[in-house]
Structure formats: C-alpha cells, structure tokens
Image (cartoon, helix red, strand yellow):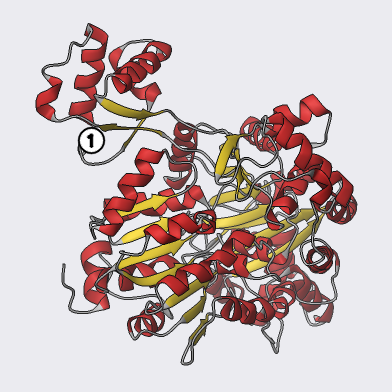
Amino acid sequence: MNYQSPIDALRRHWGYDAFRPLQADIIDSVLNGADTLALMPTGGGKSITFQIPGLMLPGLTVVVTPLISLMKDQVDNLREHDIPAVYLHSGLTRRESNLAMQKAELGKVKFLYLSPERLMNERFIGEMKNWNVSLIVVDEAHCISQWGYDFRPSYMSIAKLRARFPGAPVLAVTASATPTVADDICRALDFRPGARRFSMSFARPNIHYIVRRDVNKPERLMTVLRNTSGSAIVYVRSRKKTAEIAKSLCAAGISAESYHAGLLPEEKDERQQRWKDSRVRVMVATNAFGMGIDKPDVRVVIHYDLPSSLEEYYQEAGRAGRDGKPSFAVAIVSPRDRTTLRRRLEEAFPPREFIAAVYEEACLHIDLCLGEGQYKLFDFDLEEFCTRRKLWPATVRSALQLLSLAGYVDFVEDVDAKARVMAVCRREELYAMDFTPVQEQVMVYLLRSCPGIFADYVNISETVIASHLSIHPDVLYQTLLELSRMHAIHYVPRRQQPYLYFPSRRIETRHVSIPREVYDVRRQRMQERLDAMERLAFDDADCRANTILRYFGDNPANGCGTCDVCRDRSRQQRHDAPVGIDDSLRHVIGLHPSIGVRELVNALNMREETVIPALRRLVDRGEVKINPDNTLTSLCKHH
C-alpha cells in the first residue's frame, strides 16, 4: 500500500488527522535514515513513531521489546488495523516460530516483534540473512543501559542485529530515562553521526502530585476516593492485596476490580474492559496493569504501596489525566513504608553464595545435567520450587534475575499465552477424515468461528468453546489433542507457567560468578533510586513535581503550585483571607448542585487569588468535591 505522507498513513489506519507533539519530528527523522532516540513519557504515543515509518518504508520493521504481553497486544492491535504483523518469543512452539520466520523472510508482514533473548541465539541471527529489514526499533530502550532501572543483558545482543542490517536506522524509544541513561542508550546502540535525539518535557502540569501520610491506610484510601470522582487506579505490590482492597471498596459502595498477572486471560480481558468502559470505577492492581492501557479519563492514580524508583512511579502516575484535564497522583504512605523501601535493597541483592546455590537447586529441580541446556527452556513453578526448598520467593526471584543479568539463565514470568489453533491440512482432506461426533462438532465450530485458521494461528478460549458446545472442558481439551494427533489442526494449549531459558550450558556451581557490574554497581544504583523515592514520599522541602523533574534532568524555575507542598506553602504565606470566607464558600456552593470556579468568584465578589486558597482548603478537608468537568459540589450535610 502506497502512502502520500505520514499523515495519510495515520488517517487511513487510525483515523486521526494530526500527530501529537514530537511524533511528526521523530517520524521524519526515521524516514530520513537517522538513528533516533525518543524520550516520550507515558501516554505520549510512542508506538505511532515507529508504526508509521514501518508502514512507509519498503521492508520489514523489527521491534525488540521485553514484555511478551505487550508484544502480543501490539500485534493484535496492528492486525485489527489491517496491518500484517507477527511476533517471536521463547514461549512459541517450533511450528509457530517457523511460520513467523517464513512470513518475515517472504515479506508477507510489515512488523516483526522480537523478545531480546531471541537475539542471543547465533543460529537465529544467521537465519535472518535474507530478510529485507528497513528499520530496527528498540522499545523500552532503557533496558540496554547498565545504569537503567531495568537493565537486561539480553538487550546487549541488539548490536548483532545492527551488524546484520547496517543500512537500517535504529529508533530507540523509552518513557523514562535520566540523562546518564539516555547517553548510555546511544553508546550501546552505536548511534551513527547525524543521530537525532527528541525529548518531551517530563512536566505534567495537569497532574497534581499529593502525598498523604496516615497510619490508617485503608481509611485514607476511602477518603481520597470519596473526595474525587472519575476512573481510578490503585497500585499495590501483592496479588493478595489487590483482591482484599477491591473487596473492601465494593463493601463501601465503591465499584472496584482486582487485576494481577495470575488471572486467566479471559478474566484480565473482562475486568480491563469493564474498567475501560467505566462500568467499574476503580482498578486495584499490581504493576502488571497499565502497559499499553490508553484510557484518557483516569482522574486519580493512587499508590497504596510505593514502587522502588521514580521511573516506575512516574510511569504509573502518568496514567492519570491523559486527556489533559486536572487529575491526581496520590501516594498514601505510613512510617513503615520508609523501612520497607530500605528492606527492598537486601531482598534485591541477596549474598552471592545464595545466588550460586539457587542456580544449582534450580538445575536440580528441572533435572538438568552438567554441560546441557543451551537454548532450551523449562517450565519453572517458582512457588512450588520455594515451597519444596523452604525459600523466600522474593529473594529467590532476585537471585534468578541476577543470574539472568550475569548470563547464566533467563527467568521469564511474563507468560500468559492464550490457547491457539491452526489447520494443518487442506480443506478437501477434512472430508476424508474419520471424525467421532464430538471431534466433528469441535472441528465444525473452529471452521465457522475462526476465520484465517488455514493461514495462521488463531487465538481461542477453551472455556467459551466448551460452554457454546455444552461439553465438559476436559472433554474439549482431549478432543483438541486428538485432532492435533490426526494432523487436522495444530493445537497449542494455554500456557501460563513461567519458564527458565538457558542461553548457555549448565556449569558447575563453583564457577558461577556474579560480576561487580551486575552486583555491586547495580546495588549502588538501586540505593540511589530508593533514596530518590524516599525523598519524594517523605521530604516536604521541595515541590513534588520539581523533585521528579530534577531527577530526569529538567531544571524547573518555579514550583508547580498544585502539589501538596506548594499548596501548604501558599496557605502559610496567606495573610489577607477575609474573616468568614470558608462559611461564605460553603453557603454559595451548597446552594448549587454544581458550580464553576468563575461563577463562584463572581457570586462572592472577591478576587480569584483570595478564593482559590480557601477553596483548596475545603477540598483538602473533604467538604467540597471537584467534579470531572471542574465544577464544584458540596459534601457537607448542612449548609
């Protein structure tokens, strides 16, 4: 398909008539062949900056991204817009991988999404030799930097991709990178002369950053939600807590859902859709929720538990107010949170002897012999492993992550693949097969309900099919396996089990060594990130927004005026508030179901700079509520 311009491609596939800020500049840079770094905060529209050039360039666009779930979401989204795309990661079957590789080589797709560990396989790199690659995209590019908060050694293999296709420009995109990390990204990707760098401001003036300290977090959470309106996200750090808090909110009359990585795909989709449709107000979630979610009208993001870095906090808080309207990012903290932050450092960096012991125990757990395992993956139930060996899961997970950084093994938890099927015979061959009544029933359903089943794998829900056909799920599962053995279809059952991937052979435990760059340097960097997070939550000397901006390299001249620190400072400096202004505000607001600020100022016949601080005081006390349309409503029972 030929496009007259980037806007033409945007209009045809997405229906928009204009780009967001910086998108057009980044697209032009890529189309002109320049290596490009794009620093675009959450909600800035990163994917468009490489999807539009990928459509306009003649060959294939290879996108390296670390999250399997996000990879699948983007491919599904591209297909919905009639753009051919495939993905490759270690969780696919050999047949699925071969099919995706064939499509890439034959030019039948425009986008190929890759997990970074794929690039660690030299054989795979060799098989790419006949591909026509026009663009290399590095998503979540901070993962390639040793200084980044989420460094992944497999990202270093992207250099092999660049060497294989030297004529293809590289676009690196990330939502959060300090100046040091940005410089490191350009160095690690060997940016060529003429490279361009684009950075949106990290300022989000419509987001009001608020810290509320309270030993009674549940009660404070209720207060925040009752004094605000519109869709909300509450972030916690445990799956158990998502369900507990959602249940307590529902009991209090606030509609809520829980969301975490352990849910079935159907449950995730249903809960997410109810929240996106505003049928449910609050999503209580772990950090598994949010990537790729573009709900514009989230009015408040609440951190019930603090993340370990300002990068994570900024990304999660940035899911509020994407429509540009006033919104709140509220952190609810107690004195215990300071201790919790400091304890995370010890959990993340257990002793080296413990790390080596985990390597040995994990190899024994999966029956892996010395000298074996290279390029292989093994199901690995972390909970079962820890239970059997009486180990603490958080510390074991950290040990596995450090082993991954050192190149010994990759522990992949981001696995939640739906069941899928593909017809592997010709249509005419089906008539010659001797199906049982149940087999025929299932086969007919698949042919009628899964368009494209003869050309590619199609996602299915065993639960939906079993319910539609009125058969037991176990019977359906066995029937699909039988059809697969008959070579009528190829059936890949749903997979949620995390796995261990070995980029190299198993070695003797005494030779396992965690380098200084992986352990000591990263420990120091994590300490610095935890300190920055602690300053935001517990230091009231500086504007909250400015604390974030300085961390990312900005140099703001003035405070934001809307965070709790700035508002408290403004109240302290105010000396001319008329006596009885609070009562006047209560009276006027109480006379109207909703009233705008301008109408309120006119009704009181006072200066706006006098009214606003008093109004904020009533909002903070829970006496007045700010509605989504910025009007005001009284919450007082008596006026």
Query: With 56 as the anchor, is 165 left or right in this view?
Result: right
Q: Residue 149's quadrant in the figure?
A: bottom right
Q: Residue furthest front?
A: 371
Residue at the spot 54% in from the left edge and 54% down from the top edge: 117
| For residue 136, above or below residue 550 | above
Q: Which residue is mark 1?
A: 453
| For residue 552, above or below residue 47 | below
Q: Nearer the viewer, residue 77 or 338?
A: 77
Judge whether residue 39 can be spotted in this image.
Answer: yes
Judge whether residue 216 can be spotted in this image.
Answer: no
Q: Residue 211's quadrant in the figure?
A: bottom right
Residue at the spot 39% in from the left edge and 64% down from the top edge: 62
Number of on-image labels: 1
Query: With 113 as the anchor, is 638 left or right in this view?
Result: right
Query: With 274 as the anchor, is 187 left or right in this view?
Result: right
Give the structural element (helix, strand or loop) at label 1: loop
Residue at the spot 75% in from the left edge and 68% down from the top edge: 564
Where residue 157 appears, x then y in whole percent? Answer: 55, 65
Where residue 606 appears, x then y in whole percent? Answer: 64, 80
Quadrant for the N terminus in the image: bottom left
Where residue 206 appears, x then y in whole percent? Answer: 57, 71
Q: Amino acid at mark 1?
A: Ile
Q: Residue 261's quadrant in the figure?
A: top right
Q: Nearer the viewer, residue 481 or 128?
A: 128
Q: Residue furthest bottom?
A: 194
Residue at the spot 16% in from the left edge and 72% down from the top edge: 2
